[in-house]
Image (cartoon, rainbow, N blue to C red):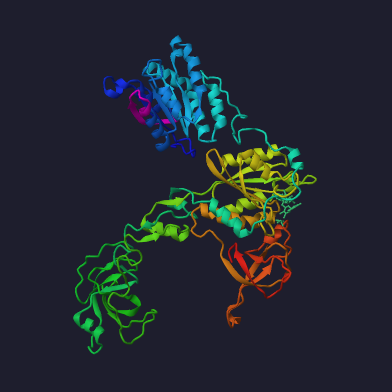
Amino acid sequence: MAQSGETHAKKYSVGILVVSDSCSSGVSTDKSGVNLREVINNNEHYLAENYAIVPDDIPSIKEKLIQWSDTVGLSLILTTGGTGFSPTDVTPEATREIIDKDASCLTQTILLESLKITKFATLSRAVSGIRKNTLILNLPGSKKGSQESLEIVLPVLKHALDLINDVKNDVKKDHIEIQKEPHHHQHQHHQDQHQCPHNHSKSRVSEKDMLNKPRKSLYPMISVQQAIDIIQSESTNLETESVFYMNALNRVCAEDITARDPLPPFAASVKDGFAVKLTQNQREYLQNNSIDTKFIFDVIGSSNAGDNLINMDLKEGQCVKINTGAPVPLKSDLVIQIEDTISLEKDSNNADKKIEIVSTSTCGGVHSGKIELKLGQDIRPIGFDIKIGEAVVKKGMIIRAPQIGICATVGALELKVYKQPIIGLVSTGNELMKPEEVKLNSGKIRDSNKSLLFCAAKSLGIENIFDAGIATDDPDTVFKVFKNAFENSDVIISTGGVSMGDKDLVKDVLEKDFGCKIHFARMNMKPGKPTTFATCEFNGRKKLIFALPGNPVSAIVTFNLVVVPCLKKLMGYTNPFFTEIKVRSEFDAELDPRPEYHRCWLQWPKLENQIEFEYPKAYSTGNQHSSRLLSMNEANVLVILPGRTEAKTRVTKGEILTALLIDKI
Ligand SMILES: Nc1nc2c(c(=O)[nH]1)N[C@H]1C(S)=C(S)[C@@H](COP(=O)(O)OP(=O)(O)OC[C@H]3O[C@@H](n4cnc5c(N)ncnc54)[C@H](O)[C@@H]3O)O[C@H]1N2
Ligand code: MOO
């Protein structure tokens, strides 16, 4: 099928089959097929990809229809010709033999309208039907008749193809458009005849259903690792896009960036000093110290950064004054830093005319002693830092400040990076007021989760975060707010409404109103047990939904644990997971039956006191209740405490435990 349903820009593929003995044998020229092709191609939703002429012969017609449907996968086939009453007219018979489903209302609609134009319309035996995902429509053989017939049903054809292909996008919009058509024909199917999962204004979840919920969760409790695996298998790297390098911060590079020129592009001086050309004696001195020679040079010019003195003719015993980064004349043997020279003669401007190398101190302080020089010293040859063609930023690297600098160095201005997901945030709960509300009404609290998750996503470098609103605890509002999130984002993160209460509506709304698949709804961890993950297709796009628990700590801990690796994968990270380290517990704790992610901050033992390797110390942030967001203050690790067993009921200070790094240390 040519229509993937991903975007509306895609067109349905159409085949035009001219059924005519005379056209097939070349006695006459096809006009109606060519005309239909033009009509179809003038419509934004279709593209006539195939065109053929076959004789009025059942096997030939069938063969083409089957091939176009089964092998080519066309969405629509329009036949023209062979639908009348003459003995050779067999198009309806051939069509009827190969269709799986009848779609005769389309033909009847054409008949009803055509009768208004000509009584002869009644002499058509045309058939329409569906084979696999292909709609096949018999049209009359005349140019005028076939065009008029097609135009009668054209307004509903796209909708019919959307339904055949299960493309749920814009079904409502299509309904409205079709109703607006001046010649619209009674469109029989309504919601009760086909599933338009989100095309309703009220939720399908009733308050009564909620009261009849089972008392125990029917969802199995899965491990955090299982949950992560499921989420990872549902998320793939997003597409790539090209962005200006200065806007690429925090994005993941999607293809190697290579250097188009070397750096330095010319041999450059590493020091401020002199680029010298040695005499024969001086060279020999460097090879065997026995020769007694002085290192005296005439200064014949100067090379500053930005100059182009590469080809300067430097003779033995001559040198140029040079600055750091300036081009070294090709004939130079080495650069000597100014600190290791003395001036023997100056010109009237006080510039050196003759110099002598008196020491070869590397630390800059002049002292007498053996002169040790190396050919090529303090010269960065061409390509020393970057070779031409070298991959300077590699696919999969996260673009941070150094990479931006490297791109500037090599002049890579447009970078191919992975797209970022658009995140939609939903808060649920009757008790929630906006943080801006100064005075809290009775029974209310401020919504902290929205701001918390907004900033958590932002600190990952995600730019597009959509606030879908606060849903109060009634199905219609939950449906409406989620719909807003679905319409405006691809990864929806909600908090609250996922545990066992009759007001915990989120899972029901996701399933019943959006046709979501709930992959899991309970994780064996504390905090965060009711964490729910679902996926669905909405307007032709895959949506990932994280319905996190309402308790603020549960929300942020599960965000870190399962949402962050997902977002990283979408954004192209090659390793989307947290770094695990070993830590020494600085606290005692009773174990919970569920593995607990204890919020801690780390301190490294002072180096001078260390005799041998010491684990960093993990200090608890205090009361770990899932409502107490203060337990995240200063926390940079989640220390994993194992689930309680008979054999092990507590951890004690000094134990070595595993921790996940969730922030800077
Ligand atoms: N009978 C059971 N009750 C509960 C269970 C259970 O298994 N059986 N699980 C508990 C666990 S564990 C958690 S965690 C919570 C999760 O509950 P929900 O996700 O349904 O969240 P709510 O009930 O809507 O809210 C919980 C708590 O968080 C506060 N909250 C909610 N949203 C926000 C927000 N945006 N900003 C600040 N605070 C928020 C809310 O007021 C509640 O206090 O369920 C247990 N119950
Ligand atoms: O799992 Mo809940 O998140 O304990 O509070």
Q: Nearer the viewer, residue 88 or 505?
A: 88
Q: Nearer the viewer, residue 574 or 443?
A: 574
Q: Is residue 48 magenta?
A: yes
Classify 314 as above or below 662. Answer: below
Q: Position of residue 519 (x, y in %)?
A: 61, 50
400 vs 92: above or below: below
Q: Residue furthest top?
A: 119
The magenta span reads 44-60
Q: Is residue 103 magenta?
A: no
Left or right: residue 108 compared with residue 501: left
Give percent across and percent down for residue 374: 29, 79
Q: For this view, does 328 lie left or right of residue 187?
A: left
Residue 364 appears anywhere in the view: yes
Residue drawn at x 38%, y 79% as measured from the top left: 364
State whether residue 483 is above or below residue 300.
Answer: above
Q: Residue furthest right?
A: 442
What residue is at 34 percent from the left and 86 percent from the top? 368
251 over 430 or under it: above or below: below
Q: Is residue 321 left or right of residue 200?
A: left
Q: Quadrant of the N terminus?
A: top left
Residue 85, x across and y down, in percent: 40, 15
Residue 509 percent across, percent down from the top left = 66, 41
Give the quadrant of residue 262.
Answer: bottom left
